Structure formats: structure tokens, C-alpha cells
Amino acid sequence: TSLDCSSTANVIGMVVDQHVSEHVLRWALRETAPDLSERIAPALDTAQVQGSLPNFVANRLSAQFGLQGPSYAISAGRLSGLAAVQQGALLLRDPALSAVIVGATDMPGHFSRSIGASEPLCEGAGGLIIKRLKEAEQSGDHILGVIEDLHLGHLNTDQAAADLPIAHRAQLGDGRSF
């Protein structure tokens, strides 16, 4: 797949760490209530700072590959990756864009997310390049699937994500649908 970086966007789905706000509060209280500030959250190290910035992954991709289209993260609980695909498809309605890199990352490393977990937590990331079908065919790209429809409904809670019937169809390269 060839990409025109001047017209490529990227959208990364991720669950925003709920503990990020603790560090903001710690910083706000450092002068007026330093003892309380220290008890709210420990000082951040470099890895924690990067991990607490929701747009870090998307912006890093743009910087590393010189992407000049929109670049942002989207959070929709467990459906964040599918929400990124949906956003990518919407972005491709803009004729000025030629491709969108969509991805998802899950880094549940905070100890509080592992309390009571029945299985060990795993971390990972994945990504796809999506293009308009006609342009992908003209470029000779290897097409893994076609997004015909992707409707995710309301994406505001994990419970909604668990209960939501996801109405989508995709055609895989070998003719199978899911």
C-alpha cells in the first residue's frame, strides 16, 4: 500500500485512563495543599506522562510518518477500535483525504484495573489502513476487506457496549462476511 502522507489521517481508539485526572489534581494542589497533593497520586515518570496523554499515539504516528491529515484519539469504552474505524470511514467522505490509518490500543497497566480480574491483563495494539475501494483497486493495494456499513449506535458506556447489537457487515477478501 502506498500512502500520500499529505492526505492521510489517523484515528486511534483507546480507553482513556480514568486515573489521569488524579495527576491533574495533584498538580493543582502542589502549592496550596502539598501533603494532600502527594497522597492523591505519586509523581509521574516519563512513561506515565506519555501514557496519560490520550492523543499521544495518534500524534506520534503523524510525527513519525509525516502524516498531514487529522490526527486524534477516540474513546468509546470497549468499542474504541470500532469507533476509530467508523470515524475513519466518515473522514474518507472528505475528497481531500486519500487514506486513514485506524487503530486501537489497550494498555490496562494500572494496578487498579487488575484487581478482581479473573485472568491476567494483556496489552496490545493493532491497526489498519482504510481507503476508498476504487482508489485502493487503482493503486493495486491488497484488499483484506470492504466496509459496507458500520453503525455503532450510542457509544457512551461500557454497559451500552456490552448490550449494544452492533449492526455492521464487512466482506472479507475471500468472500466471507461477518
Image (tube, rainbow, N blue to C red):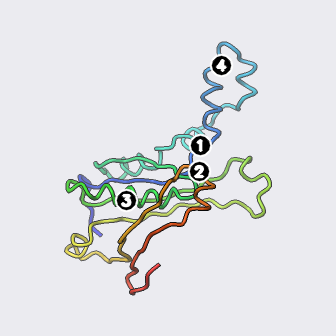
1 or 2: mark nearer the eye = 2
**Which callout, 1 or 2, points at the residue further toward the start of the chain?**
1
Residue with the mark numbered 2 = 157
2 or 4: mark nearer the eye = 2
Instruction: Indicate the amino acid at tag 2.
Output: Thr
User: Marks 1/2: CA distance?
Assistant: 27 Å
Q: Is residue 112 left or right of residue 79?
A: right
Give the quadrant of residue 176. bottom left
Residue with the mark numbered 4 = 29
**Which callout, 1 or 3, points at the residue further toward the start of the chain?**
1
Residue with the mark numbered 1 = 47
**Residue at screen point 29% across, 55% down:** 8
Residues at discs 4 and 1 in contact (Cβ within 8 Å): no
Q: How many marks?
A: 4
Binning the other alpha carbons within 10 Å of mark 4 as few (below 14), some (14 to 19) or many (20 upward) gives some
Give the quadrant of residue 146. bottom left
The residue sitting at the top extreme is: 32
**Which callout, 3 or 4, points at the residue further toward the start of the chain?**
4
**Residue at screen point 34% across, 60% down:** 89
**Which callout, 4 or 1, points at the residue further toward the start of the chain?**
4
Residue with the mark numbered 3 = 101
Residues at discs 1 and 2 in contact (Cβ within 8 Å): no
**Which callout, 2 or 4, points at the residue further toward the start of the chain?**
4
User: Marks 2/4: CA distance?
Assistant: 30 Å
